[in-house]
Image (tube, coloured by chain):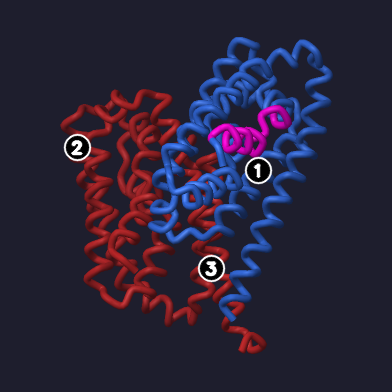
Amino acid sequence: MSVIQLAIIFFIVTNPIGNSPTIIALIKNYTIKEQQRILFREAIFSMLLAIFFLFLGETFLKCLKIENYGLTTSGGILLFLVALKMIFSNEREERASSSQVDPFIVPIATPLLSGAGLLTMIMLYAKQEGSDLKILFAILLAWVGITLVLVTAPYLQIFFGKRGLAALEQLMGMLLAMIAMEMIVQGSSLFISALQLQS
Amino acid sequence: MALLNIVLVLFLIMDPVGSLRSYLSMVDQISSSRRSWIILREMFIALAVMLGFNYLGEYIFGFLSLSETTLHLSAGVILFLIAIKILFTASDSPRSNLPPGEPFVFPLAIPLITGPALMATIMLYAHLEPYQSIMITAIFIAWFISMLIFLFAEPIKKILGKNGLLAAERLIGMVLVLIAVQRFLEGILLFWSTQPHAQ
């Protein structure tokens, strides 16, 4: 596969366009300038994570004895917890927590953007293509697009308005719960095949 | 199991980098020479607890007539809940409500360095690892690195910055979730293989 093809695949798997309403709903309490700053930072973090997994992913997982199913399932569980927080967020609690730190790495950079799916995919392609440099270029190329999409995403806020965003949070929480369940189901099926292999 | 695996897992669960912020806020008023003394004392208490669990683990194991499956599952669940608290900082977590003043045993030695998750993990590894010498060496190495990190808390904070520390804390929390889920799933695998119908 060419670099461009790989870059497009990474872009699609990361799904910045589909994820941006969710991400905006997650950080709706910030001004647009701050949101752009947060999203730019998260995009960089997710890219660093992808590059880290490209070169060291396999060693890292082997050192901790983490299997594929563990990676996928834990990503799903984390996302599900985030989704629950989004759906059952009440105003009082939010005001109390607004003084706290902004969403840092979890959940935006990982597992939303650089989720288990992307990370295992990168490791797989790196093995398949046999050239880490090619994958690296593809990642860099994909992240140019991803960063652009994410930085323009806060302008959606103007379109939706404050009330719209609050409604959006509920909807996106529901969708996120589904994405999370999908990951857990995938992890479970990987787990079951490991179970059958064992017995 | 290789020595390196055990060292890495124990070090990650001790999570000295993640505890740095709590530690620094705790010793804010205390002079630096006093701090080193506190750290040495607390670390030796922690080491004693760890070694104690390493040796006594097997007896506790027999005394409560636990099975290896139980140990896997409970270590997984405990570690998972602790990691979730690191990722989603709640106002009721022990990390944010530390008693001010000089720490003695609580909260630095137990539970920040040697928490319940570490004790359960040491018990599990002491059971799995046939050679006690490897276990002891692993505990010493992980403990020593943690002590170095606590001793050089100030320079590390200066290098990483406030956000860097937070990022490190989150990343380690993420890895802890991975370890926890993997451990739990391994417990299920083990449970499955010990059931009569598997044969």
Mark 2 neighbour class, 10 Å CA radius: few under 14, some 14 to 19, many 20 or more: some
Query: Which secondary structure type mostly characterizes the magenta part of the structure?
Result: helix
Query: Where on the picture, by quarter, is residue A8?
Result: top right
| Distance from Cα at disc 3 to Cα at disc 1 | 21 Å
The answer to whether residue A107 is visible is no
- Residue type for callout 3: Glu
Q: Do labels 2 and 3 share a chain?
A: yes
The answer to whether residue B61 is visible is yes
Location of residue A98 with respect to A69 vertically, above or below: above
SS type, badge 1: helix
Mark 3 neighbour class, 10 Å CA radius: few under 14, some 14 to 19, many 20 or more: many
- Residue type for callout 2: Ser
Q: Color of chain A here?
A: blue
Name the chain under label 3. B
Quarter of the figure with the C terminus of chain B = bottom right
Quarter of the figure with the N terminus of chain B = bottom left
Spot occupied by residue A75 in the image (x, y as percentages of width and height) = 60, 48
SS type, badge 2: helix
